């Protein structure tokens, strides 16, 4: 018997933090679009947020990205292989921006079925005495308040269809103590707790909530951290990982693709650790 795939509802995914070419957000957008899901890609600015203030590292990152123009380039790329995509900008930590981005996605595509809370603010090896209150509050604003605001805005549309997937991007740091990452670790730990509690809240309406906790990834942010930790001997870090390689953004995107599918319907409130067997 031939199954008519056209009878299945088209899913729509909203993904935050998509502006960097080699980021988890961009990789997830490409992967879901290739699976036939319409994607709404967002970031604070159209070009994305460079995860460093080090001028030398920023220049190196821009050189690696070449002609990449952020979420506009991502939309063009997805459109070129036949996918559907829309680019929006906004600050996930702003209540008004969060509501607007979700509402615009709904207006464009008629539903918001999948939300990937990927936007993040991080720190790099800062001692607590060197960390300002403003930096601490910004990390919590993006990582925790942003996930709350985006989820709250999206849930009402998911409840209308009695189906939804919310994916929060946490970190292995939520369960591990790494020197110089106190605020980031605390924020990701809070996001883990939010994931489990929200899953209990919305599960009766057909919405599942999960988190993905990456290890050290070869994203822009991960590359900067790796260079700081291992200097020129990047292989030293890979040797500490069970599978003997760093993660790629596509490794995370593949897990999110499963979560976004019908096959994950009996999984909720869980944390998917994607770290190649651990080790930093």
Image: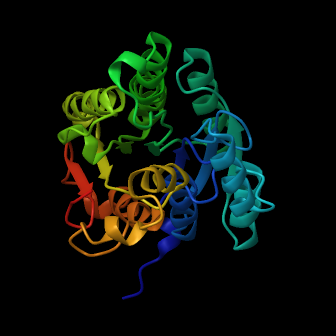
Q: How many marks?
A: 0
* Percent of width and height locating residue 93: 52, 21
Q: Residue at x 46, y 22 (%)?
A: 149
Can residue 271 be seen by looking at this rendering?
Answer: yes
Asked if residue 238 is positioned above or below residue 158 in the image, the reply reads: below
* Percent of width and height locating residue 276: 26, 67
- Side (left or right) of 98 relative to 165: right
- The residue sitting at the bottom extreme is 1
Task: Look at the image and name its color scheme.
Answer: rainbow
- The residue sitting at the top extreme is 133
- The residue sitting at the front extreme is 232
Q: Residue at x 62, y 22 (%)?
A: 97
Q: Which of 17 and 278 lies nearest the eye of the viewer?
A: 278
Can residue 10 be seen by looking at this rendering?
Answer: no
> Based on the displayed image, in which of its 4 quarters is residue 3 positioned?
bottom left
Q: Residue at x 61, y 26 (%)?
A: 91
Asked if residue 204 is positioned above or below residue 113 in the image, the reply reads: above
- Side (left or right) of 232 relative to 163: right
- Side (left or right) of 122 relative to 34: left
* Percent of width and height locating residue 17: 56, 42
* Percent of width and height locating residue 267: 20, 52
Q: Which of 206 and 125 lies nearest the eye of the viewer?
A: 125
Asked if residue 244 is positioned above or below residue 115 in the image, the reply reads: below
Question: Which quadrant is the C terminus positioned in?
Answer: bottom left
- Side (left or right) of 103 relative to 120: right
> Based on the displayed image, in which of its 4 quarters is residue 143 positioned?
top left
> Based on the displayed image, in which of its 4 quarters is residue 247 positioned?
bottom left
Question: Which quadrant is the N terminus positioned in?
Answer: bottom left
């Amino acid at each position: 018997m031939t199954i008519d795939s056209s009878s299945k509802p088209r899913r729509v995914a909203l993904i935050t933090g998509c502006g960097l070419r080699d980021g988890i957000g961009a990789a997830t957008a490409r992967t879901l679009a290739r699976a036939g899901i319409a994607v709404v890609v967002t970031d604070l600015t159209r070009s994305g947020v460079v995860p460093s203030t080090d001028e030398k590292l920023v220049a190196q990152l821009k050189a690696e990205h070449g002609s990449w123009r952020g979420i506009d380039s991502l939309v063009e790329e997805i459109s070129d292989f036949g996918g559907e995509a829309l680019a929006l900008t906004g600050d996930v930590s702003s209540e008004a921006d969060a509501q607007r981005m979700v509402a615009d996605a709904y207006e464009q595509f008629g539903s918001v079925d999948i939300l990937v809370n990927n936007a993040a603010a991080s720190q790099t090896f800062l001692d607590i005495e060197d960390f300002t209150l403003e930096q601490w509050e910004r990390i919590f604003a993006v990582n925790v308040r942003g996930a709350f605001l985006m989820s709250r805005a999206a849930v009402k549309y998911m409840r209308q269809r009695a189906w939804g997937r919310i994916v929060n991007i946490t970190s292995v740091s939520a369960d591990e103590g790494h020197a110089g990452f106190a605020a980031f670790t605390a924020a990701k730990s809070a996001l883990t707790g939010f994931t489990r509690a929200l899953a209990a809240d919305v599960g009766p309406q057909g919405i599942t909530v999960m988190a993905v906790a990456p290890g050290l990834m070869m994203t822009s942010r991960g590359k900067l951290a790796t260079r700081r930790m291992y200097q020129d001997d990047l292989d030293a870090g890979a040797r500490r990982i069970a599978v003997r390689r760093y993660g790629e953004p596509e490794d995370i995107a593949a897990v999110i693709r499963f979560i976004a599918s019908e096959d994950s319907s009996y999984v909720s409130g869980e944390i998917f650790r994607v770290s190649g067997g651990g080790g930093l």
